[in-house]
Amino acid sequence: MGQIVKLDDVRTASLLPNYVAGQWVTTAQRFDNIDPTTGEVIGSVCEAGRAEVDAAVMAARKALSGPWGQMKAADRVAMLHAIADRITARFADFVAAEVRDTGMPLHFADHVNVPRGAANFKVFADLFANVPTETFPMDTPDGGTALNYGLRVPRGVIAVISPWNLPLLLTTWKLGPALACGNTVVLKPSEETPSSANLLAEVMAEVGVPDGVFNVIHGHGADAAGQWLTEHPEVDGITFTGETSTGEAIMRAAAKGVRPVSFEMGGKNSAVVFADADIDAAVAGLARSCFQNTGQVCLGTERVYVERAVFGEVVARLAAVARALKPGRPGEDGADFGPLNSRTHQEKVLGYYRIARDEGATVVTGGGVPAMPDHLKGGWWIEPTVWTGLGDDARVVNEEIFGPCCHIAPFDSIDEVIGRVNATRYGLAASVWTSNLSTAHRMGAALEVGICWVNSWFLRDLRTAFGGAKQSGIGREGGVHSLEFYTELRNVCVRL
Ligand code: NAD
């Protein structure tokens, strides 16, 4: 195992240690934390080796039967509230960490990412405190009676593997229910955005979460901490958000020992605008869903279908919005969007911008890198981009790009557009814009997605089921649905 250190000793060196069994652990192997707005190194992260991964999992295993396992349900609820309150008390620290690691706009961190970080603990604490289980009185073959009742028990040690696009929101979306159900956790945050995981560890320590209940290991995925965590035989369940191809690798790891998985994965989401829609609202909604957080939102739109009568108008108006968006540092006056998260991701998105041109797309706006002032030239900037003119078989219409771009195509009938929207291996989300109630309900029933918004986008009630259809996910989290993964439902049969 690495070296145990005091947090204050490493903080000054901008070094992020691992958090194992309530202790901060450095390792000799390090990787850089990079500011995506400038490309400059802003810190160093201790990469967990097999020894640290093993220590974290074993600490989580041990903590299951310690004070955490004995804790009264009401005390656990109070502790989750205390975690949420502490996140709120340290709001500015979390916002600073998130914008530094991701480059996301300040208002997005302030209004979406960090508040949801606190809400994810409160909502699940309150929900699960009031969940009933089933009971079935029965007659026995010998003329007696018996009573069956369900007991929800924690699944055990949960591995949480999260991506870089909304680090705090997506991580706590899994931590909240995992802890509320009495599990212990080993978190491996994305190597691109490690900071808020350590702040969470600080918060856990500050409110007295017992050692070993929450552990953080830093590192990469394949042949590194991520893979070693998912392969560890003492992990009882794996919850993962990220790319579908990574989900395939994690599923292979989970097959050994037949461990359950909960996956939230990639998408290629469509928006459909009918001619009867409120076009102002539709264009505003499209602009958010295509360009918010520089297109790095799993629920974002990359395929737009517009009924032919209003096609030209919607293309022109969405392109005008895209052109008017100003890139800039988080919090900078007039900045609408930040950079992409990493050089690798910028190369990927620019690669798709080239593919679109090679495939014969009409580039209505964007398609390149915006001119930036000297101090930001080293960042991973990208232009919001709108294409038209491609068939549904084009690569940029089929493959997830995860950038601020969309292809807009006209359609002529509802049956046609349903078929086109569903012709993808993904099935995460869709948004439909119409003033016709029947059209709205018909689309909601016909589109093969986990969530279908009508005249809205990104409205989330945390009590609802969330997840992806087809290759966008396995299982549902959210509300009482999270119980399916984070608990075992045991039947107790008592002969009376
Ligand atoms: P990614 O799959 O590259 O990485 C996600 C996490 O998995 C990281 O922590 C990474 O280190 C880890 N990882 C990678 N290989 C691994 C392996 N072999 N074993 C174990 N862990 C491994 O995804 P990303 O680039 O960080 O995130 C972007 C993707 O996430 C997009 O596809 C996006 O659609 C998806 N996403 C989905 C949702 C959703 O709710 N469905 C939400 C946000 C993001």
Image: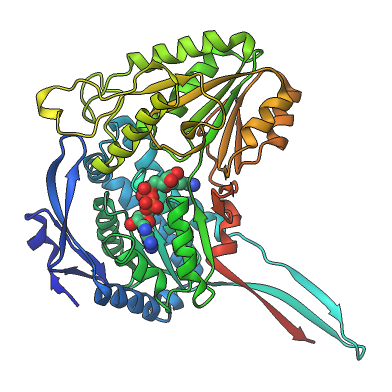
| Residue 126 locus on image (x, y percent) | 52, 55
Q: Nearer the viewer, residue 298 or 158?
A: 298
Q: Is residue 455 above or below residue 195?
A: above
- Please say whether residue 117 is visible from this viewpoint: no
Give the mark count.
0
What's the colour scheme?
Answer: rainbow
Can you tell which quarter of the image residue 179 is in?
bottom left
| Residue 359 locus on image (x, y percent) | 44, 26
Can you tell which quarter of the image residue 134 is in?
bottom right
Identified at 53% across, 39% down, the residue is 460
| Residue 369 locus on image (x, y percent) | 26, 25
Q: Relative to 419, is 381 on the left or the right? A: left
- Please say whether residue 113 is visible from this viewpoint: yes
Can you tell which quarter of the image residue 115 is in?
top left
Q: Which quadrant: the C terminus?
A: bottom right
Q: Relative to 283, is 21 on the left or the right? A: left
Identified at 43% across, 56% down, the residue is 246
Q: Which quadrant: the N terminus?
A: bottom left
Q: Relative to 25, is 152 on the left or the right? A: right
Q: Nearer the viewer, residue 390 or 441?
A: 390
| Residue 74 locus on image (x, y percent) | 49, 65
Q: Relative to 450, is 143 on the left or the right? A: right
Q: Residue furthest right?
A: 143
Q: Is residue 136 above or below residue 218?
A: below
Q: Nearer the viewer, residue 345 or 478?
A: 345
Q: Is residue 183 above or below residue 112?
A: below
Q: Nearer the viewer, residue 461 or 285?
A: 285
Identified at 29% across, 24% down, the residue is 368
Identified at 51% across, 31% down, the residue is 394
